[in-house]
Structures are given as structure tokens and as C-alpha cells.
Amino acid sequence: MEEINALFGGFAVAMTPFNLLLMIVGVTLGVIIGVLPGLGGANGIAILLPLTFTMPPTSAIIMLSCIYWGALFGGAITSILFNIPGEPWSVATTFDGYPMARNGKAGEALTGAFTSSFVGAFFAIVMITFLAPLVAKFALQFGPPEFFSVYLLTFCSFVGMNKGSPFKTISAMMLGFALATVGMDTVTGQLRLTFGNPELMRGFDFLIAVIGLFGIGEILLSMEEGLAFKGAAAKIRAKVVWETWKQLPKYWATSLRSCLIGCWMGITPGGATPASFMAYGVAKRVSKDGDKFGTGKMEGIVAPETAAHAAGTAALLPMLSLGIPGSPTAAVLLGGLLIWGLQPGPLLFVEKPDFVWGLIASMYLGNLAGLFVVLTCVPLFASILRIPFSIIAPVIIVICAVGAYTVHNAMFDVWLMLGFGVLGYLFKKLDYPMAPMVLALVLGDRAEDSFRQSMLFSQGSLDIFFSNYLVGSITSLALLLLFWPIISKVIGKKKVAA
Amino acid sequence: MSEHSNNSNQDSVISVRAMDIITAILFLVFSLVVMVGSIKLGASWGSDGPEAGYFPFYISLIILLSSTVTLYQAVIVNKKKKTESFVDKEPFKQVIAVLFPAIVFVLGVQLIGIYVSSALYIAIFMVWLGKYRIWKAVAVSIGVSVALYLMFEFWFQVPLPHGSWINPLEFIGVR
């Protein structure tokens, strides 16, 4: 069991007083970010990233990943107490969470949500602990064609799994790729698509895109909806926690199913949001009193929260082992690795075991810290939401502007951020998905490099992506997912006809 | 959504279909710009492998195709769906009420630096949209600016913009 040994080594790295302090700070910040409209895991981490440039990488990633755990926890608070999902993945939690809170069971609902989140995350972390090293070892044999086929799979699965128009998904994704090519070409050193503008030489940094799309875009949307926060009272007593914990084991089957759904959706870049909906749907179908879902059933909270956390955590598995993030937030963390001078991908496990295992160990500790913080501090976090939007909105825009500026110390980026904000508002309203665009912007250069290297090997023939069983089956799977919207339509029609 | 479609004709600023069409056309223009740029760079096979414009050329080609389909769907297929509103008048005013000051704020950051423009922006926003007392707005806005200074420049030593035109805080040592 070398993983266990490595994990204990990781605990030794993570358990310094400084790192433990950073964990608490990170989780608390994360919950605040998760509660506030306009700030979420992805852009919250993007804004705070420049502050970590001077820290040692292990401490930095521990703090940033803890912000992520905190944000995952935080989404549930607003869903249950205010019927406002603080994060997209907690939409499904409102269905049963808010009715429970209205029936005076806010404490039970919150305890149930937090505990399920913890269980989902824990399941995913255990999976990462044992699976990530294997995947990384396997991926060490990958050449450029294999890597390109994995990128292809990642992006095709967005097309296959997204509910909206596949053409809009493709347009948004390719926009990300196109923006990624702007600036210096990594292979030939030529300047590309800058149109003589020196500001464009740096290229489009995805951190700016994330801050604009998710931050400013979200504020514009919230403003349009005219948010009025009317919330249920929040307090969690120790006795309620205890009582809820006693009845939670009843839902072990729901929990396990949601864990599996979450892990699957997290590794393939389906993400936490569809995972939570899917888990809710499955739980509703399987449950004995499925027709009572939506009136305040505990199962209706357990299912989406477990799945969302499992997915959010599992998204770090491909990020760590392959260098391919499964979600926008994982992409921001990957951006951090690059800035700290670490090359994400299979070699990371060999070259920087301290870093990788320190991070994995910190996931266990960070989620434990998260559970403790949210259970004890709910009233405090709920009070943040009572701050009127006319204060929150300008303050968040100021914070976003600061975040965008500090990435490169460039004023041009702040303007870009505003542009991305308007784009985010437009995209959200027209159902253009933003996650594939952000991932394309992050992975664009590397996908392009692996594509061009493969083309060099094969002298321009696309046959190389079918040249052996491994790359051939990944490519085929990718194409299957790409054409899934058409395939599923054909199958559906046949079923109707029969 | 039924009450929405009843009165959407008077309140709607623009329909979803129209916005879909505009966005798809913008995508088309963007793809053509990228395509021309890539061809100028060389989008074919050079002596040492694919040229710099090779990858972006195909990317722009895919955008061209996919947004043509989106345009077709919006114009032809969704012809009857035009009643659905993209945004109504009142919410649109709210959006503009955030967006326009935000643009002025960013311009302010560029000219007179982050601290004074943040303080002014937050204070004006609070008084104008939130109807707060002036002293409350001043307290919050100055508080945020001071917190920004302490957090970024003092503790983490990350420089923030002080103004390219004038630095209004030079006299208290912010430079």
C-alpha cells in the first residue's frame, strides 16, 4: 500500500500550524464567497490567486482548495435559508431544503446538507487517493496523440452531456480556443491574431475571463432579477445536529448512489451542477415516497448535496493526474500550478510527490474543517446575505476589478473583464454554456501543441488518432459523445415508432 | 410563464429570438476575422510542419459552421417564438444602472487610481440606488478602500493602480 504511506507523508506536509491556519482561513473565505452573489468558487479563487504568488506552492494550493471546499459548502446555506442558490450546483438543494426551512426545520436541513456534502467529498477524496496515482502512472506512457484524444474526449463530452443546443456549446467552446490562440505562438514564436495591438500580445488570460464571466455577469443577472432576500431564521443547536446525524444513516443507499453519480460526473467534465440534478432525479424515482419530494424531504437534500460535492472534488482527479481540469474551478487551480512553476500532469506525481500528497491530505483535513466551520457559524454567514444588494454589488465589482488588475498589473485586463462580464450576461441568458469556453481558454495552447505534434509525427494525417487501440478507443468514445445529441434523437424516434 | 408572454410585447426591450440572431451574427463576424488573420499567418503546411495559423483557421471554420446553424435555427425554425422576451424594460434599466457606473468606475481606476474611484463608486451607488444616508455610505466606502490598501499593498505587497492621470492620494504617501 504505497498510497497509504504517501498519504501519511502528505499529512506530515499539510499538518503544520501555518497550513492548518490557512485551511481555516480558506474555508471561511470560501463559505463567504459561496454565500455572496457574484462571487463563486471559480472567480473567488481567481481573484485571490495573486495574493498567493509569494507563498510556498503547497501552502498556496491548500488555501485555495480550501476556498473551493468552503464555496461548495456555502451554496447550501443560501439555498436552504433563502431559496436562492448561491452557486448553480445548489439549485437542486432548494427543492426540498427551502420547504424544510419554512416548516421550521432549517437546522435539520442544514445539518443534513452539510453532512451529505462532507460524505460526498470524502468518498471522492478516497477515490482520488487510490485512483489518481494509477491514472497518472498509466498516463506517463501517453504521447501527444493520446493527450490530444483525451482533450478531444473532454470537450466532446461537453457537447454530448449538455442539455442545451449542441451548436451553441460548440460555438462557445471554439470561442475559447480562438481566444487562447491570441498572442505568442508557443511553437513558432510568431505573434498571432494581435492585429498590431501591443496589449493583445499577452493573450487573453482565462483568469480575467473567469472573473468577468462569473463575477460581473452574475451581478448583472442578479440585478435584473431584483433580488430581495427574505430568509428563514438560522441556528443550529448541538442537539439538532445529533438527532439529524442519527437519522442520516437511513439514507445510505441514496447517499452511495449520489456519490457514484457525482464521481462519474466530476471526472468526465459534466460538473457538479448536472450531477446534483441527476442525483436528485434518480433519488426521486427510486425512493418509496418520491411523490413527496419537493415538500421538504431529507432525501431530497442528501441526494443533490452528496453528488455536487463528490463531483466538485472528483473534478480535481483529472486535473492532478492528467493536467486536464474537470471544472472551471479546477481550471483556476491548474492555472495556479502553472504560475507557481509546477507542470500539472502525470509527471507531477513523480517530480513533486510532497506537493501532490500534501494537497490530497489537505483535502481530508480541509473538508473536516469545512464541516466544523459551517456547522458552528451558520448564523454569521446567513447575516451576510442580509446586507442589501446596493452595498454588495458595487463592493463585488470593486473586488473583481482589483482581482483582474493584479493578475498582470494591467489596466487593459480590467476593461477586458467588463467585456467578459457583458458576454457572461448574454451567454447566460441565451443558454451558451460558459464552462466549456473557460476550459477551452485554459487548455487551448496545450491541446493545440499536442495536435500539432501529432500532425508532425503523422505528416498531416488524421489516422494517427486511430493508430493504436488506446488512442483509437478514446477518439471513438469522443466522437460518440460528440454525435450523442443526434444518436439519442434517432434512438428516441425509433422507440416512439415501436 | 403565461403572464410573461401576455404583456411581453409592451414591456420587452428585445426578444430572445432577436438576441439569438444578433449573437450568432457576431459569432460569424468573429470567425471571419480570425479566419482572415489565420490565413495571413499561413494556415497550411510549411516546411517544418503546420504553420502558426493552421489551428486557429480550423477553429474559426468550426465557429463559422456552428453559428450558421444557430442563426438558421433562430431565423427559420424559431420564427413563431418571437413573443418570448429577452429582457423587460424595468429589469433592463436595473442592468444599465449597474453596468454604466461600472464602466465609469473602471475609467476612474485608470485615471485617478483604485482607492478614490472605489470610494466614490460605492458611496454614490449606495446613496443613489440604496437610498442610504450619506454618512453611512461614506463610512462603508472609505472602509473598503482602506481595507483594499492594507490587504494588497501593505500585507501582500501587490501593487494596485494609483492613477495614470493624477494620483490624488500622493499627499498621504500612497505612491
Image (tube, coloured by chain):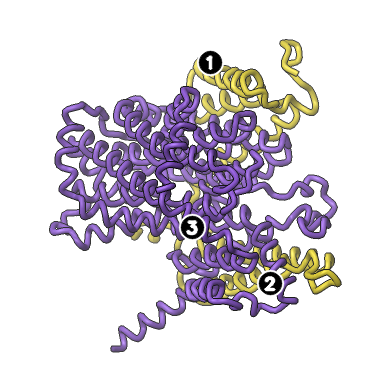
Chain colours: A purple, B yellow
Q: Is residue A454 visible from the viewing direction of this image?
A: yes
Which amino acid is tagged 3? Answer: Val
User: Is residue A490 rendered to the left or right of residue A108?
Assistant: right
Label 2, label 3: how far apart the Cα atoms are: 34 Å
On the image, the x and y values in percent for residue A119 come to 30, 44
Residue extending farthest to the top is B172
Q: Are marks 3 and 1 in contact (CB under 8 Å)?
A: no
Q: Which residue is mark 1?
A: B139
Which residue matches tag 2? B61
Which residue lies under the disc numbered 3? Answer: A135
Residue located at (46% from left, 40% from top): A68
- Tell me which chain the residue with mark 3 is part of: A
Q: Secondary structure at mark 1?
A: helix
Q: Residue at (54%, 48%) from the top-left corner? A: A349
- Disc 1: host chain: B
Q: Which of A424 and A54 lies nearest the eye of the viewer? A: A54
Report the chain holding disc 2. B
* Label 2 packing within 10 angstroms: few (<14), some (14-19), many (20+): some
User: Please, is residue A372 above or below residue A82 in the view?
Assistant: above
Looking at the rendering, which quadrant does residue B172 occupy? top right
Residue at 75% of width from left, 64% of height from top?
B33
